[in-house]
Protein backbone atom coordinates (compact mmCIF):
# COMPACT_ATOMS: atom_id res chain seq x y z
CA UNK A 1 0.00 0.00 0.00
CA UNK A 2 2.81 2.39 0.91
CA UNK A 3 4.69 1.60 -2.29
CA UNK A 4 1.55 2.20 -4.36
CA UNK A 5 1.04 5.58 -2.69
CA UNK A 6 4.66 6.52 -3.43
CA UNK A 7 4.00 5.82 -7.10
CA UNK A 8 0.80 7.89 -7.06
CA UNK A 9 2.43 10.91 -5.39
CA UNK A 10 4.25 12.28 -8.48
CA UNK A 11 1.20 11.53 -10.62
CA UNK A 12 -0.99 13.60 -8.29
CA UNK A 13 1.53 16.45 -8.39
CA UNK A 14 1.73 16.30 -12.18
CA UNK A 15 -2.08 16.29 -12.45
CA UNK A 16 -2.46 19.38 -10.25
CA UNK A 17 0.20 21.22 -12.26
CA UNK A 18 -1.50 20.29 -15.55
CA UNK A 19 -4.85 21.56 -14.24
CA UNK A 20 -3.30 24.82 -13.06
CA UNK A 21 -1.53 25.32 -16.41
CA UNK A 22 -4.78 24.80 -18.30
CA UNK A 23 -6.57 27.30 -16.07
CA UNK A 24 -3.76 29.86 -16.36
CA UNK A 25 -3.64 29.83 -20.16
CA UNK A 26 -7.17 28.88 -21.16
CA UNK A 27 -9.51 29.76 -18.27
CA UNK A 28 -8.19 32.93 -16.66
CA UNK A 29 -8.77 36.08 -18.75
CA UNK A 30 -5.89 38.17 -20.06
CA UNK A 31 -5.28 41.28 -17.97
CA UNK A 32 -5.92 44.48 -19.95
CA UNK A 33 -2.84 46.52 -18.96
CA UNK A 34 -0.04 43.94 -18.83
CA UNK A 35 -1.49 41.42 -21.23
CA UNK A 36 -0.33 37.82 -21.15
CA UNK A 37 2.76 38.74 -19.07
CA UNK A 38 0.43 39.12 -16.08
CA UNK A 39 0.02 35.34 -16.07
CA UNK A 40 3.50 35.08 -14.53
CA UNK A 41 1.69 36.15 -11.35
CA UNK A 42 0.08 32.68 -11.09
CA UNK A 43 3.53 31.09 -10.79
CA UNK A 44 5.50 33.83 -9.04
CA UNK A 45 3.30 34.24 -5.97
CA UNK A 46 2.71 30.50 -5.32
CA UNK A 47 6.45 29.87 -5.77
CA UNK A 48 7.22 32.53 -3.16
CA UNK A 49 4.66 30.96 -0.82
CA UNK A 50 6.20 27.50 -1.34
CA UNK A 51 9.68 28.94 -0.71
CA UNK A 52 8.54 30.43 2.61
CA UNK A 53 6.81 27.20 3.59
CA UNK A 54 9.86 25.10 2.75
CA UNK A 55 12.17 27.37 4.69
CA UNK A 56 9.90 27.45 7.73
CA UNK A 57 9.99 23.65 7.77
CA UNK A 58 13.79 23.88 7.56
CA UNK A 59 13.93 26.36 10.44
CA UNK A 60 11.62 24.43 12.75
CA UNK A 61 13.49 21.19 11.99
CA UNK A 62 16.82 22.93 12.63
CA UNK A 63 15.65 24.18 16.02
CA UNK A 64 14.44 20.68 16.92
CA UNK A 65 17.80 19.28 15.81
CA UNK A 66 19.68 21.66 18.09
CA UNK A 67 17.41 21.04 21.09
CA UNK A 68 16.95 17.27 20.69
CA UNK A 69 20.22 16.40 18.89
CA UNK A 70 18.35 13.95 16.66
CA UNK A 71 19.64 13.48 13.11
CA UNK A 72 16.17 12.83 11.72
CA UNK A 73 15.39 16.53 12.20
CA UNK A 74 18.63 17.48 10.50
CA UNK A 75 17.68 15.29 7.53
CA UNK A 76 14.32 17.04 7.30
CA UNK A 77 15.98 20.46 7.54
CA UNK A 78 18.49 19.67 4.81
CA UNK A 79 15.81 18.23 2.53
CA UNK A 80 13.43 21.17 2.95
CA UNK A 81 16.28 23.65 2.38
CA UNK A 82 17.00 22.13 -1.04
CA UNK A 83 13.30 22.29 -1.90
CA UNK A 84 13.27 25.93 -0.75
CA UNK A 85 16.19 26.67 -3.07
CA UNK A 86 14.25 25.23 -6.01
CA UNK A 87 11.31 27.53 -5.37
CA UNK A 88 13.62 30.48 -4.64
CA UNK A 89 15.19 30.08 -8.09
CA UNK A 90 11.70 30.08 -9.58
CA UNK A 91 10.83 33.28 -7.69
CA UNK A 92 14.02 35.03 -8.77
CA UNK A 93 13.42 33.98 -12.38
CA UNK A 94 9.75 34.86 -12.76
CA UNK A 95 10.10 38.16 -10.88
CA UNK A 96 12.48 39.83 -13.34
CA UNK A 97 10.42 38.57 -16.29
CA UNK A 98 7.39 40.35 -14.85
CA UNK A 99 9.50 43.38 -13.93
CA UNK A 100 10.71 43.81 -17.53
CA UNK A 101 7.12 44.46 -18.59
CA UNK A 102 6.07 46.45 -15.53
CA UNK A 103 9.18 48.61 -14.98
CA UNK A 104 11.02 48.38 -18.28
CA UNK A 105 13.95 46.64 -16.56
CA UNK A 106 14.63 43.11 -15.41
CA UNK A 107 15.94 44.30 -12.07
CA UNK A 108 15.58 47.34 -9.83
CA UNK A 109 16.91 47.63 -6.32
CA UNK A 110 13.44 47.57 -4.84
CA UNK A 111 13.24 46.75 -1.09
CA UNK A 112 11.21 43.59 -1.63
CA UNK A 113 13.36 42.38 -4.52
CA UNK A 114 16.54 43.08 -2.58
CA UNK A 115 15.34 41.34 0.60
CA UNK A 116 14.10 38.36 -1.46
CA UNK A 117 17.54 38.16 -3.11
CA UNK A 118 19.23 38.19 0.30
CA UNK A 119 17.00 35.34 1.47
CA UNK A 120 17.78 33.37 -1.69
CA UNK A 121 21.50 33.81 -0.99
CA UNK A 122 20.95 32.58 2.58
CA UNK A 123 19.16 29.49 1.29
CA UNK A 124 21.93 28.90 -1.25
CA UNK A 125 24.59 29.31 1.45
CA UNK A 126 22.85 26.75 3.64
CA UNK A 127 22.66 24.20 0.82
CA UNK A 128 26.30 24.72 -0.16
CA UNK A 129 27.47 24.38 3.44
CA UNK A 130 25.62 21.11 3.86
CA UNK A 131 27.05 19.80 0.60
CA UNK A 132 30.62 20.62 1.63
CA UNK A 133 30.62 19.01 5.05
CA UNK A 134 28.59 16.81 7.39
CA UNK A 135 30.53 17.82 10.50
CA UNK A 136 28.48 18.54 13.62
CA UNK A 137 29.79 22.10 13.79
CA UNK A 138 28.60 22.76 10.23
CA UNK A 139 25.20 21.23 11.02
CA UNK A 140 24.73 23.54 13.99
CA UNK A 141 26.00 26.60 12.13
CA UNK A 142 23.62 25.83 9.27
CA UNK A 143 20.77 25.45 11.76
CA UNK A 144 21.52 28.93 13.10
CA UNK A 145 21.66 30.23 9.53
CA UNK A 146 18.17 28.87 8.90
CA UNK A 147 16.85 31.02 11.74
CA UNK A 148 18.42 34.09 10.11
CA UNK A 149 16.68 33.21 6.85
CA UNK A 150 13.34 32.79 8.62
CA UNK A 151 13.72 36.26 10.13
CA UNK A 152 13.86 37.66 6.58
CA UNK A 153 10.37 36.36 5.72
CA UNK A 154 8.43 39.03 7.69
CA UNK A 155 10.96 41.62 6.48
CA UNK A 156 10.16 40.74 2.88
CA UNK A 157 6.46 41.00 3.65
CA UNK A 158 6.56 44.45 5.27
CA UNK A 159 9.19 45.92 2.92
CA UNK A 160 6.55 47.19 0.47
CA UNK A 161 4.77 49.14 3.21
CA UNK A 162 7.84 50.18 5.19
CA UNK A 163 9.97 51.55 2.37
CA UNK A 164 7.35 52.00 -0.39
CA UNK A 165 9.19 50.32 -3.20
CA UNK A 166 7.97 49.69 -6.73
CA UNK A 167 6.90 46.12 -6.07
CA UNK A 168 3.10 45.69 -5.84
CA UNK A 169 1.63 45.33 -2.37
CA UNK A 170 0.26 42.07 -1.04
CA UNK A 171 -2.38 40.50 -3.24
CA UNK A 172 -5.92 41.55 -2.49
CA UNK A 173 -8.10 38.79 -3.81
CA UNK A 174 -11.23 40.88 -3.61
CA UNK A 175 -9.93 42.97 -6.51
CA UNK A 176 -9.40 39.99 -8.80
CA UNK A 177 -11.72 38.85 -11.51
CA UNK A 178 -13.58 35.69 -10.29
CA UNK A 179 -11.84 33.53 -12.90
CA UNK A 180 -8.46 34.98 -11.89
CA UNK A 181 -9.17 34.36 -8.22
CA UNK A 182 -10.17 30.74 -8.86
CA UNK A 183 -7.09 30.17 -11.01
CA UNK A 184 -4.84 31.67 -8.37
CA UNK A 185 -6.27 29.42 -5.65
CA UNK A 186 -5.82 26.36 -7.86
CA UNK A 187 -2.19 27.35 -8.50
CA UNK A 188 -1.60 27.80 -4.76
CA UNK A 189 -3.01 24.34 -4.16
CA UNK A 190 -0.89 22.86 -6.96
CA UNK A 191 2.32 24.37 -5.57
CA UNK A 192 1.44 23.12 -2.09
CA UNK A 193 1.02 19.59 -3.43
CA UNK A 194 4.30 19.86 -5.36
CA UNK A 195 6.06 21.10 -2.23
CA UNK A 196 4.81 18.13 -0.20
CA UNK A 197 5.77 15.61 -2.90
CA UNK A 198 9.21 17.14 -3.47
CA UNK A 199 9.92 17.22 0.26
CA UNK A 200 8.83 13.62 0.79
CA UNK A 201 10.93 12.40 -2.15
CA UNK A 202 13.98 14.40 -1.09
CA UNK A 203 13.64 13.19 2.50
CA UNK A 204 13.42 9.61 1.24
CA UNK A 205 16.69 10.10 -0.66
CA UNK A 206 18.32 11.55 2.43
CA UNK A 207 17.31 8.51 4.49
CA UNK A 208 18.65 6.18 1.82
CA UNK A 209 21.94 8.09 1.80
CA UNK A 210 22.21 7.67 5.57
CA UNK A 211 21.58 3.91 5.28
CA UNK A 212 24.28 3.61 2.61
CA UNK A 213 26.73 5.53 4.83
CA UNK A 214 25.93 3.24 7.75
CA UNK A 215 26.45 0.13 5.65
CA UNK A 216 29.75 1.45 4.29
CA UNK A 217 30.91 2.27 7.80
CA UNK A 218 30.02 -1.24 9.03
CA UNK A 219 31.82 -2.75 6.07
CA UNK A 220 34.91 -0.67 6.82
CA UNK A 221 34.85 -1.66 10.50
CA UNK A 222 34.49 -5.36 9.61
CA UNK A 223 37.43 -5.12 7.23
CA UNK A 224 39.56 -3.43 9.90
CA UNK A 225 38.70 -6.15 12.44
CA UNK A 226 39.79 -8.98 10.12
Image (cartoon, rainbow, N blue to C red):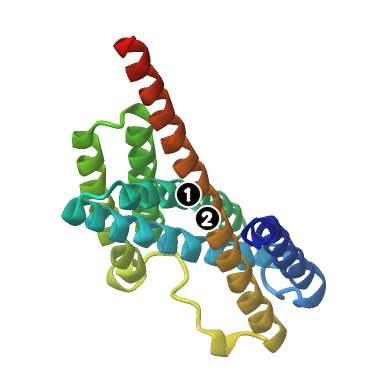
> 44 or 8: which is nearer to us?
8
Residue matched to label 2: 200
Q: Secondary structure at mark 2?
A: helix
Above/below status of 71 relative to 186: above
Residue at mark 1: 203
Question: Which residue is rendered at x = 32% and y = 34% of the image?
Answer: 129
Q: Quadrant of the N terminus?
A: bottom right
- Give percent across and percent down for residue 134: 30, 32
Location of residue 185 in the rendering, given as x and y in whole percent from the top left corner:
61, 78
Q: Residue at x 76, y 77 (%)?
A: 29
- Residue 207 x/y as whole percent: 45, 43
Nearer to us in this view, 190 or 95: 190
Q: Position of residue 82 (x, y in %)?
A: 45, 46
**Residue located at (72% from left, 69% from top):** 20
Proximity of marks 2 and 1: CB atoms separated by less than 8 Å: yes
Tell whether 87 sits left or right of 21: left
Q: Where 122 sits versus 200, above or below? A: above
Q: Which mark is residue 57?
A: none
Apparent side of residue 211 relative to residue 24 in the rendered image (left or right)? left
The image quadrant of residue 35 is bottom right
Residue 119 is left or right of residue 29, and the answer is left
- Quadrant containing the C terminus in the rendered view: top left
Q: Quadrant of residue 15?
A: bottom right
Identify which residue is drawn at 40% across, 20% down.
219
What is the CA distance from the residue labelled 2 to the residue labelled 1?
5 Å
- Badge 2 crowding class, 10 Å Cα cut-off, few under 14, some 14 to 19, many 20 or more, is some
Closer to the camera, 215 or 13? 215
Amino acid sequence: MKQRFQILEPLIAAATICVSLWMVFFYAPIEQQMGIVQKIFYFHVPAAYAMYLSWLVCTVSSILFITKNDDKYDELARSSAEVALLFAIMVMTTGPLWGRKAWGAYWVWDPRLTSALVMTLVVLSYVILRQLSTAEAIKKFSAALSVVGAALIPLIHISVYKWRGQHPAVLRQGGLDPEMKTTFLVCMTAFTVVFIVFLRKRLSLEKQRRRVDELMQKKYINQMNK
